[in-house]
Amino acid sequence: DGWQKGLADGREEGREEGRAEGLAEGLAEGENKANIATAQRLLAMGLSTDQVSAATQLPIEHIEKLKSSLDTK
């Protein structure tokens, strides 16, 4: 029965690791979406690409793409 306990413990450990990884990924994705929304607002307010990048920590290339998509709207 020792191997069954080991198997059950291993499964539970795997589940816990999976939950932790999923939570971390979800938080990172949410933070990225919030930064993009903030960048869009800052661009709409007239801030420069460099200023928006500094404020949101998004790459300048990403800010430039956001800016061009706002310009086409």
Image: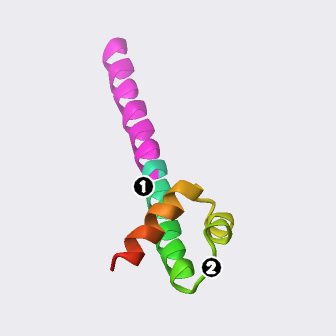
Pick the residue in front: 18 or 7. 18
Residue 16 located left or right of residue 57? left
Q: Amino acid at mark 1?
A: Gly
Residue 29: x %, y % from top left: 44, 57
Residue sitting at x 51%, y 63%: 64
Which disc, if any, is residue 26? 1
Question: How would you classify the magenta stretch by its main secondary structure?
Answer: helix
Residue ID for mark 2: 47
Asked whether residue 71 is drawn in magenta, I would say no
Question: Of residues 14 and 60, which is closer to you in this image?
Answer: 60
Which residue is depicted at the point 49% across and 69% down?
34
Q: Is residue 60 above or below residue 51?
A: above
**Neighbour tally class for label 1: few under 14, some 14-19, many 20 plus, Cα within 10 Å:** few
In the rendered view of the protein, which quadrant contains the C terminus?
A: bottom left
Display coloring:
rainbow
Tell me which corner region of the image, top left, top right, bottom left or bottom right, holds residue 58: bottom right
Above or below 61: residue 54? below
